[in-house]
Image: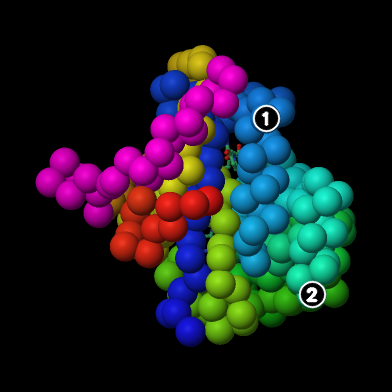
Amino acid sequence: MADRPYTLLSCGMSIDGYLDSSGDERLMLSNDADLDRVDEVRAGCDAILVGATTVRNDNPRLLVRCPERRLHRVTRGLEPSPVKVTVTCGADLDPASRFFTTGEAEKLVYCPTPVLARARSRLGASATVVDGGPRVSMTAVATDLAARGVERLMVEGGGTIHTQFLAEDAADELQLVVAPFFVGDSRARRFVGDGPFPFRPGRPATLAEVRRIGEVVLLRYALSERFEESA
Ligand SMILES: NC(=O)c1ccc[n+]([C@@H]2O[C@H](COP(=O)([O-])OP(=O)(O)OC[C@H]3O[C@@H](n4cnc5c(N)ncnc54)[C@H](OP(=O)(O)O)[C@@H]3O)[C@@H](O)[C@H]2O)c1
């Protein structure tokens, strides 16, 4: 068994690198064809991870939408949609949010040890709350997920989470979709913050594919030697 799952970061951003607007309304950075592509990628994974702010702001279901793909998973002995995973420092998550209330598969919440009791009392009926140690690292989360049988992990943001996976060199692939507009507002969340990223001019990531999907473009980067060409 590998130390960590094959880890694929998936993200949509504006031309100027924003994940969202600064307002309350969710910014659409994708089109129907790309959403369908993302659905297929989801269907091929064992777990999907998002940060707690994404759970709070977007209230996502994180389910496989296409009935045929759901059925195909079931015929393979899997739940219709992957396990859902989030991380939190404050445990300020609503058990009534869709992350917890939708989907048959397990929900996992990683938090630092000092928050464990609070997280279990708030979320313990809706999810498995996991002790992430004094400080939760993405590498440790991924290692724990591998021990739970997760072989393919899809990370769907937000920026804080992508930053850590990249800075820890804990990802194998990046699927970056660029929408054809600017946000131009530094109050909005960028794809990544500052970090000691391993992919620098002297050690660039490998551009594995460029695919036009209507008016958006998918850039696939290989981030490790485990990169799988056919995704
Ligand atoms: N365009 C896209 O593809 C896409 C995808 C997803 C999200 N988004 C957007 O991204 C925005 C959110 O991004 P974000 O960067 O602000 O937040 P985020 O990455 O979704 O979540 C950050 C939160 O996750 C928890 N967290 C992160 N690292 C942790 C660690 N090491 N240990 C414990 N907990 C940790 C903390 O939760 P607590 O605050 O609970 O402690 C932290 O505040 C939203 O506006 C959303 O719409 C866009």
The reply to whether residue 110 is in sight is: yes
Which of the two residues, 23 or 219, is positioned nearer the viewer here? 219
- Residue 204 falls inside the magenta stretch: yes
Disc 1: which residue: 33
**Number of numbered discs:** 2
Marking on residue 77: 2
Q: Residue at x 53, y 46 (%)?
A: 10
Q: Furthest-left residue in view?
A: 202
Marking on residue 124: none
Q: Residue at x 81, y 56 (%)?
A: 70
The stretch in magenta equals 198-221
* Image location (x, y in percent) of residue 106: 76, 71
Name the amino acid, label 1.
Answer: Ala
User: What kind of element bears circle 1?
Assistant: helix
200 w.r.t. 189: above or below: below
Q: Coloring scheme of the render?
A: rainbow
Q: Quadrant of residue 150?
A: bottom right
* Image location (x, y in percent) of residue 184: 46, 17
54 w.r.t. 21: above or below: below
Which of the two residues, 202 or 23, is positioned nearer the viewer here? 202
| Label 2 Cα neighbours within 10 Å, binned few <14 / some 14-19 / many ≥20 | few
Kindly tell me whether mark 2's CB lies below 8 Å from ligand 1: no
* Image location (x, y in percent) of residue 39: 69, 45
20 w.r.t. 122: above or below: above
- Calculate the distance from the C-alpha at mark 2 to the C-alpha at mark 1: 28 Å
Kindly tell me whether mark 1's CB lies below 8 Å from ligand 1: no
Q: Residue at x 83, y 67 (%)?
A: 74
Q: Quadrant of residue 221?
A: top left
Q: Quadrant of residue 38?
A: top right
Instruction: Indicate which disc, 2 or 1, sits on the residue closer to the N terminus.
Output: 1
Which of the two residues, 161 or 135, is positioned nearer the viewer here? 161
* Image location (x, y in percent) of residue 30: 62, 28
